[in-house]
Amino acid sequence: MIVGGGPIGIACALEAKKKGLSYLILEKGTLVNSLYNYPSNMTFFSTSEKLELDEIPFISTNPKPHKQEALEYYRRIVTSNHLNIHLFEKVEKIDTEADLHKVTTSKRTYSSKNVIIATGFYDIPNYLNVPGEDLPKVAHYYGDPHFYATQKTIVVGASNSAVDAALEIYRKGGDVTMVVRGPAIGERVKYWVKPDIDNRIDEGSIKAIFNAEIKEIRENKVVITSKDGEQVLENDWVLLLTGYRPNFEFLKDMGIKLSEDGKRIPQYDPDTMESNVKGIYLAGVICGGVETHKWFIENSRVHAKMIMEDIASS
Ligand SMILES: Cc1cc2nc3c(=O)[nH]c(=O)nc-3n(C[C@H](O)[C@H](O)[C@H](O)COP(=O)(O)OP(=O)(O)OC[C@H]3O[C@@H](n4cnc5c(N)ncnc54)[C@H](O)[C@@H]3O)c2cc1C
């Protein structure tokens, strides 16, 4: 059983098929659900060949593909290889009994000798836990800039997601203020984007308040605290782009141990990707714990081969 129909779950299915193993992908949403929910104008930082699975050519018009091209690519892989996948079927829990794993989904229960967890990190936002975070004007995911045209929009965060959103919304006529907890825009922001955001902030086209935090969100205002004290800003929309995290409870409930150093890295053998629970493997971005930038498609697609070699040889 492969839990998660993202790029890495698909890579595992391709590899299982090549090795003649029986397999099924269970995906709680649509195909490559996380990618489908990425911002509509999103361009990958990787070049297309780095996103390829099983050396199936990914042809894109520019070196770095656009979201729609990636959806096209991964969809075509699944349909033309006739991969076994159940969409809109969520895995609720996994219980291990002797050498078998009982996989309970929103629809039924399966038994499987081996289970691969490739559930990514994009389902659970890092909440700020401030009053007003549940108001309808607040979003933890950014879609399209047009929505924010002429609107007073606060973007919280200073990493790639926040910076991309701030620049796009500004260029579609939004009035953008970034609220950043640290003293500057993040160091991991794409090197070809960083000068753009720094220059827009320096010239005042995009306002930025550094060393600041949101204290409260109200219907038409936001209260911010910084070293200058408390400020109340007029505001229409708030985008809290402060990252996402894997479902740690899901992992713990199936018996997977997490590191206790704050990184919450799940325990696995780096040669086989098998977790501390025999027959349960980890693949893709989930392997990084809270460090969701550590593993991505480019460097974790190899997990598929490692896992299937171990399963086939056991
Ligand atoms: C804006 C953005 C840009 C990025 N650009 C790049 C890039 O250029 N290059 C790169 O290599 N990486 C990039 N990444 C990172 C990359 O998208 C992720 O690392 C990648 O999606 C990881 O693949 P995955 O299959 O491990 O997880 P995901 O793609 O997140 O797939 C996990 C799947 O599991 C499903 N799922 C979750 N829980 C359950 C459950 N209980 N039951 C069933 N299904 C479940 C989810 O719906 C999802 O479809 C980017 C990420 C973002 C956010």
Image (cartoon, helix red, strand yellow):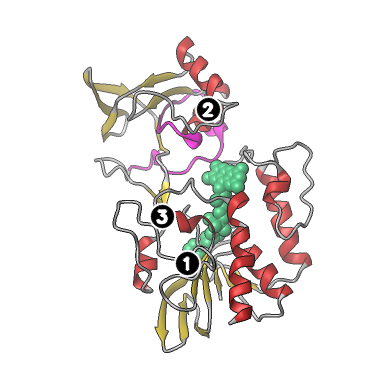
**Of labels 3 and 2, the one closer to you:** 3
Horizontal relation, residue 146 to residue 70: left or right: left
Residue 62 found in image quarter: top right
- Decide: few, some or many residues near mark 1? Use Cα within 10 Å; few <14, some 14-19, many ≥20: few
Q: What residue sits right under mark 3 in the picture? A: 289
The number of numbered discs placed on residues in the rendered structure image is: 3
Q: What residue sits right under mark 2 in the picture? A: 169
Q: Quadrant of ligand 1?
A: bottom right
Amino acid type of disc 3? Gly
Span shown in magenta = 135-161
Distance from disc 3 to disc 1, alpha carbons, whole Å, reads 15 Å
Asked whether 103 or 12 is in front, the reply is 12
* Local SS, label 3: loop
**Residue plotted at (51% across, 55% down):** 285
* Local SS, label 1: loop
**Residue 298 x, y percent position in the rendering:** 62, 49
> Is any part of residue 146 visible from this angle?
yes
The extreme top residue here reads: 203
* Local SS, label 2: helix
Distance from disc 2 to disc 1, alpha carbons, whole Å, reads 43 Å
Asked whether 41 or 14 is in front, the reply is 14
Amino acid type of disc 1? Asp
Q: What residue sits right under mark 1 in the picture? A: 269
| Dot placed on the residue nearer the N-terminal end, 3 or 2 | 2
